[in-house]
Image: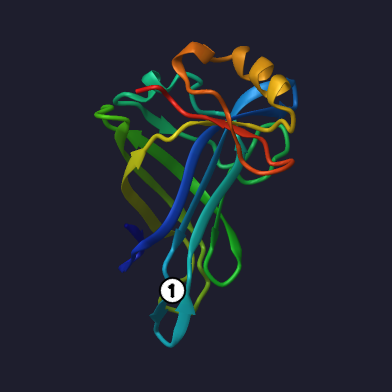
Amino acid sequence: MLRIADQIFELESYIFCPCVCIGQNGWEVSWHLEFKAKAKEVYGHSWTPSITAHGFSKLVQNLEDLNNLKLTLPDNDSETNEPLFLLYVLEHEAVRSVELSFGEWKNNEIEFSFSGVSDVGADEVYGDNIPIKINLKWKYTGISVSEGEEAWAIKKFSKFYDPEKFFPPESLGKGRGFIFRPLN
């Protein structure tokens, strides 16, 4: 469920996964977050909102550390000064005052909530500082590695995680990297 002010949208899809990729200081664990809602008419306009954060490296590396974690995040990336999160409704707007909350892991799932504010600018009803909320049960499916060759993907993955706790990597498609799925 995605809520923007008093409007509730059903989530069509979401991606919320750790990724081993190249960052400002070499290889790191980063996060890719993307939440897409189904289209809905709001006061005569079709809204298909989405929230994204690419290369977001401020979360924890070990998934177990997400248990009962609450994070208050800065509005902008400290290195690039770009917004950490973007909301798309009619155009892209920065999401501010972001808080992420996690419950406890149960069977590779964890309760997740996202809250923040953004400027929708749709009309007089939805202008600035509109509250945004996402609630869902996140199912952990694996960790991706942005590397085209399997042997190199395993090597980079091994810098951060124990490959013995994962199935052999699966290709995400030529040039798209690999995903390591947990054994349990």
Q: Position of residue 173 (x, y in %)?
A: 66, 44
Q: Which residue occupies 43% across, 35% down?
A: 141
Quarter containing the C terminus: top left
Question: Is residue 67 placed above or below 12 in the rendered structure?
Answer: above
In the picture, measured across the screen, residue 44 lies left or right of residue 179, that is left
- Judging from the image, the colouring scheme is rainbow
Task: Compare residues 155 and 118 and report the one nearer the observer.
Answer: 155
Which residue is identified by label 1? 39
Residue 17 image offset from top left, x and y in percent: 50, 36
Q: Amino acid at mark 1?
A: Ala
Hey, which quadrant is residue 151 in on the image? top right
The residue under the point 30% across, 34% down is 110
Residue placed most toward the observer, 12 or 67: 12
Q: Which quadrant does the N terminus fall into?
A: bottom left
Q: Quadrant of residue 74?
A: top right
Q: SS at mark 1?
A: loop
Q: Name the side, left or right, on which 3 lies relative to 60.
A: left
Please provide percent x and percent y for residue 175: 74, 41
Q: Residue at x 47, y 20 (%)?
A: 166
Residue for point 45% across, 43% down: 98
Q: Residues within 10 Å of mark 1 (few under 14, many from 20)?
A: some
Residue 16: x %, y % from top left: 47, 41
Q: How many marks?
A: 1
